[in-house]
Amino acid sequence: MSLTIEVIKEKCVGCGRCVRVCKTGTLKMDRASGLVYNTKEHCDNCWDCIYACPTKALDIMEAE
């Protein structure tokens, strides 16, 4: 089973901390909306993004 990150849009404030610590490019910032999204790139499951998020807007989910 492969795991990745789900962005909970209602909690995301667009601070970009998770994007800055993401080593694999799994998370990117949408400049138009100011919110983070999952690019579906391979996540290495380090979970640095989860620890960096001040609003707990990220969750672990099974990759498609």
Image (spheres, rainbow, N blue to C red):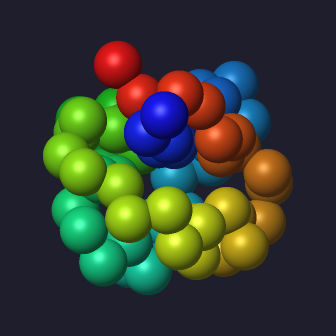
Q: Residue furthest front?
A: 1
Tell how many labels: 0
Quadrant hosting residue 60: top right
Farthest residue to the top: give it.
Answer: 64
Residue 48 position by quadrant: bottom right
Q: Residue furthest right?
A: 55
Q: Position of residue 8 (x, y in %)?
A: 64, 30
- Which of 18 and 16 lies nearest the eye of the viewer? 18
Residue nearest the observer in this picture, 51 or 45: 45
Q: Which residue is at 44% across, 39% downward?
A: 2
Tell whether 32 sits left or right of 44.
left
**Left/right of residue 51 with respect to residue 13 in the rendered view:** right
Quadrant where the C terminus sits is top left
> Is 13 left, or right, of 38 in this rendering?
right
Q: Pick whichever, 39 or 32, lies toward us.
A: 39
Position of 61 relative to 35 (above/below): above
Tell me residue 23's x, y (percent): 30, 78
Residue drawn at point x = 43 percent, y = 80 percent: 21
x, y (%) of residue 20?
A: 38, 78
Please tell me which residue is depicted at 50% across the width and 62% down the height of the picture. 45
Tell me: 24 left or right of 2.
left
Query: Residue 53 at what x, y percent from top left?
Result: 69, 64
Whether residue 7 is visible here, answered yes or no, is no
The residue that appears at 24% across and 35% down in the rendered structure is 40
Q: Visible in this render: residue 29?
A: yes
